[in-house]
Image (tube, helix red, strand yellow):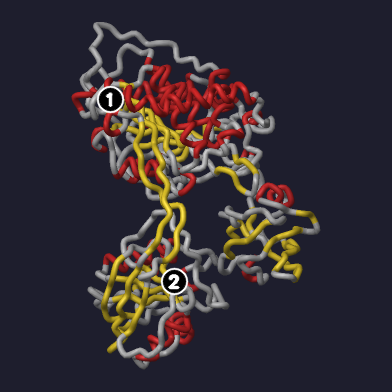
Amino acid sequence: MRNGLKLRRWAVLAATASMVAFTVPALAKTRTPKHDSRTLNRAPRPKSIAVASHHVDPRRLRAHVALLANDELGGRGTGSHGIDLAAGYIAGQFASAGLLPGGPNGTYFQDFDVVVGGTPGKKTSLRVDGLEKTIVVDKDFRPFDFSTTGAFDGELAFVGYGITAPDENYDDYAGLDVEGKVALMIRREPEFLSPDGGPSRHATFESKIKLASKHGAIAVLIANDTRGDREDRLRLFRPRGVVYGLPAVHVKKELANILLHRSGRPAIEKLQAQIEGKKKPISFMLTGVTMHGIIDAELETVVARNVIGLLPGNGPASDHCVVIGGHYDHLGTRGGEVYNGADDNASGTAGVIELARQFARVSYRNRSMLFMSFSGEEMGLLGSRYYVAHPTVALEKISAMLNMDMIGKLKQNGNGKRLIVQGLGTGSSFKRIVEKNAAAASLTFEPDDSARGPSDHASFYEGGIPSLFFFTGVHEDYHQPGDDTEKVDFDGAAHILELVYSVANDLVNAEAPPVFAKVDKRAVIRRGPGGGPPRVVMGIMPDMEDSGQGGWRVAEVFPQSGAAKAGMKSGDRILKIDGKKISGFRDYRKITKDKKPGDVIVVTVRRGDRQLDLSVELGSAG
């Protein structure tokens, strides 16, 4: 077994974790009720302050990671048996450290449903008054997986690309009232709004649908544009439980053109060309065209759970708390290979457990503390988003959130120490506190003011809470089966945890909490030791659910990318790059590590029973 735990030892550990999972809820009900500000004040106030040593033992970190990243847990996929064992183990560690249950109903667990798949429901339909053509689901249209369900009836309004871009003096909604209407729009955006060839924030489905809702539309139809998908295909229906607030339907150009023609208007292709040529929006009502729609979905769900432990404070600010967290889920088992996620994020989970032990030994805490392990992070920050939407402590009582995700690569490939701390601009005291404690710990770090990054701190930041993120960067084993225990730098992780402890201790015992501030830019995610050469991309989304038939399956080809211009299509299976066999992202990184944006690679793909060589110009991920 890859992580060195013998099966007999594992059986004992697994049994212990299972026992904890079943016994902790019962224990919790006898220890504390559902907590509120009175619960946070339960601990007695000491006459003097005694601060315990906060040295973190790397051997303890290794033990936690070796268990959580063991093959027998199957990669801790959300909703799996393995992640339930992990949840039980974490709850047991919280209980043994002396933490009170921090979840609802006096337990350590906050359960929530996660959508893991589904199909359009049998009731799903579109109908237009007076139109003889039968509109067929999966042939003419398909609901987006982020659509809300329900019925709608309304006249159609064509709103161009459905974009408002004030900086470019462009507004598809100018002079058009779409209140109570069904908004028909073109996918993506005009080229003059993306001069660098990459999509802007205006082009996203989320942006388009939320803008339509803001203008009072009751539903959205999005038709394929002429550049991005010449074959006029419909997007796959892969629901993940995220909805954008309106019934949203993907329609083929053919159907959109029928609707436009019924109102005496030009086809999508001509409207798109006119917008591009004049660089001005074209929007209008489709007079006499009324649509009746029903969006239904048959969803497959699993139960996920956050694990939460509470340390009550005993100072004047004990009705407030500081959160220390990190996700404990990973990618599960795919194509027969276990994605153990030792660094991502068994390392951060081990850190949460050990910091809970350290703080439980301290006799005085001005504020209370919540220690959290989130599930569903890999599916879109689902656990932390659920907590922020359903907090066990009112959000205005949370002074700060500290997130640890992938802290196991401080010394990477012998190229020195590299810690990234993000969110420094979101709290008024963050920079001073982090800089002071990093200097005391002899740790240098790469600062970033933003908390808008792809990990759980972002959920708390969006909830108006000052949030910090501790991270050692993306590496070649990221989201690969090779992310195993023996590759984690436990000495480095322990060093980082001593810094996190000191920062958290200052925040817990500060007289005043940090003042929240918005930082309206995305955080920079570093890749490879020391940043490395510019990372290059073909412009594809690989199929993460690929069952493994050799090669690397393409799920989606991004418009205007090198792959799109070379003629690559979704469903192609990449077999070789420059004559070298490829089976996944790791192979791709190795083959392209010395490439620069603008270089051309020869990509051999299998398409049906044919094998093709495509010349793909690489672009920059930036």
The answer to whether 528 is drawn above or below residue 245 in the figure is: above
284 versus 93 height, above or below: below
Amino acid type for the residue under numbered disc 2: Arg
Residue type indicated by callout 1 = Lys
Residue 548 appears in view: yes
Q: Which mark is residue 142?
A: 2
Of 301 and 345, the residue lying toward us:
301
Q: Secondary structure at mark 2?
A: strand
On the image, the x and y values in percent for residue 166 come to: 34, 67
**What residue is at 48 percent from the left and 35 percent from the top?**
328
Quick one: 433 or 305, which is closer to the camera?
305
Q: Is residue 533 above or below residue 365?
A: below
At horizontal 30% and vertical 45% (from top left) the residue drawn is 389
Q: Which residue occupies 48% across, 19% down?
A: 440
Disc 2 crowd rating (10 Å Cα; few below 14, some 14-19, many 20+) is many
Instruction: Tell me the SS state at disc 1.
Output: helix
Residue 29 bears which disc, if any?
1
Q: Quadrant of the C terminus?
A: bottom right
Q: Identify the mark nearer the N-term, 2 or 1.
A: 1
* Residue 342 location (% of width, % of height): 58, 33
Position of residue 134 in the picture relative to residue 350 (left or right): left
